[in-house]
Amino acid sequence: MHGKMMGTSLTITEIMRFADRLYQDTEVISITTDEGVHRSTYGKVFKRSNQVAHALLHLGVQPGDRVATLAWNDHRHMELYYGISCSGAVLHTINPRLFPEQLVYIINHAEDRIIFLDPMFLPLMETLADKLPSVKAYVVLTGGEKMPDRKLSPIHCYESLLSDQDLTYEWPELDETTASALCYTSGTTGNPKGVLYDHRSTVLHAYAACMPNVLGLSHDDVVLPVVPMFHVNAWGTPYACPIAGAKLVLPGPKMADGESLHALIEGEGVTIALGVPTVWFALLAYLKESGKAVKTLNRTIVGGSACPVSMMEEFEEQHSVYTHHAWGMTEMSPLGSVNRLLPGMGSLNASERNEVRAKQGRAPFGVDMKIVDDDSNELPQDGVAFGDLKVRGWWVADGYFRQDDNSDTHDGDGWFSTGDVATIDQYGYLNITDRTKDVIKSGGEWISSIELENLAVAHPDVAEAAVIGIKHEKWGERPLLVIVATEGVVPDETGILSLFKGKVSDWCIPDSITQVDEIPHTATGKISKKTLREQFANYSFG
Ligand code: AMP
């Protein structure tokens, strides 16, 4: 027997309609590459999304067509998020930091029809355009008077294209499983793989993100996503903030510039900021150097890579900002877990509390997780046993775009293998110890590179740290600590190694430290262990 409730589809269009009705005057502030600070509102953004939808029709875009963006976090990108997906086309956000060959691969694989791009990316696209047969037109995200000289054709100016269009649009009533957006993972092996989100998964993810135990968003918040809208939808904030009615502050290209982030936080009254650890290293260094404060900021949500406890402590002790550690993946839209202490944990002493806070947190309602051994047997959730982390849920991909066989990544019961190795404790707190490929196997035991890296960056002489396994005759592999020293400092290697004593078993302590000018990163800002392992392929412990 079916219930007698309305079966209204969960669509992104409903988010737009809701915020346009109830939060039309709530601000959307952007840093743009062509006109500096731009002030808009949800009302204005969504009116212009109507114009985007008309412009897409004018450009010949059909439902299901992929429409790409190569853009920073700003109001125009937000207009495209809604204009493209709500018209029934698929928003393909492209990460401009990918290698040119990867860009060509993903644009051709997605068969993008139109590319909307920031003026800054014109030179890049000009070098690739003759390899992109599916692309029928380019649109530069700027106003007519700022339109740069261009070699691409056909090419349009975004503001001129929009200015002729109607401010109202008859949005189609989409089935909730209609594809809404596409994001390619920047895996370090093989070609990037496309994750195809749909309206339903996006709405459920955004709804969950707002909940108190997840991101806890409300219309009292001012949210600064320093996570790019070109990678996993800026952690869903462009959808969650309009649901919560939160003011949105979009930092444009100023993603890892401490001074600009500070100015935005102070100037716009930011209460919650989200980003990867690298971003917060930059902000904290700027605050330290300048003696400035972030008075309105209450919380940071840190994920994408492990957040060191030393960073949480600095935020809390120096700036009264509480940090929530979070974990997720492109395949998970991305939220998989967020760390909030349970009632009763307030009475833990500082070190016990930090031990819990260092973990990546608990899954929200909507995500199921488990750890398994090599034979896929479920392991106990006791905080000790570690194994491959598997997930399933409403906003987890059940395969990749244009890849029929998902048996490499999904088991018969629909669980997705994340490629992460983790423990889960009796309270459900997840602790990521490594990527499966990065785990160091020494004498049959596993050493967590993440744990060692977190300890290393707590030392004042260390600006950034990475631990990799180096081949070893006796033990198979042994850990090598690679560091970038704090500017102007000659690192005290003995002091750094002594940090590990008593915090990890003696056999987990790195055999040696080596200093480099720069640690390589992937297109999404994570440490590229693969590149680092290649760099140190011939290394041997002296
Ligand atoms: P991506 O799909 O590019 O967002 O990368 C997802 C991967 O980033 C995960 O599978 C983890 O390996 C890693 N990751 C994300 N958040 C964290 C975190 N808080 N701690 C450790 N690793 C993380």
Image: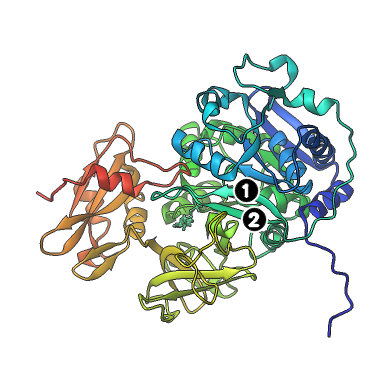
The residue drawn where x is 33% and y is 49% is 529
Q: In this view, does 505 lie to the left or right of 125?
A: left
- Give yes or no for contact between labels 1 and 2 (Cβ–Cβ under 8 Å): yes
Report the front residue among 158 and 219.
Answer: 158
Label 2 sits on residue: 197
Q: In this view, does 6 lie to the left or right of 528?
A: right
Res. 400 image quadrant:
bottom right
Snapshot colouring: rainbow
Number of numbered labels in the structure image = 2
Farthest bottom residue? Answer: 1
Where does residue 201 sit, x and y in percent of width and height?
Answer: 68, 61
In the image, residue 280 sits, relative to residue 474, either above or below, namely: above
Report the front residue among 431 and 373.
Answer: 373
* Badge 2: residue crowd in 10 Å (few <14, some 14–19, many ≥20): many
Label 1 sits on residue: 233
Q: In this view, does 511 lie to the left or right of 457?
A: left
Where does residue 396 sit, x and y in percent of width and height?
Answer: 59, 63
In the image, residue 496 sits, relative to residue 69, either above or below, namely: below
The residue drawn where x is 62% and y is 24% is 119
User: Upstream in the sequence, badge 1 or badge 2?
Assistant: 2
Helix or strand or loop: what does disc 1 sit on? Answer: helix
In the image, residue 373 sits, relative to residue 140, either above or below, namely: below
The image quadrant where one finds the N terminus is bottom right
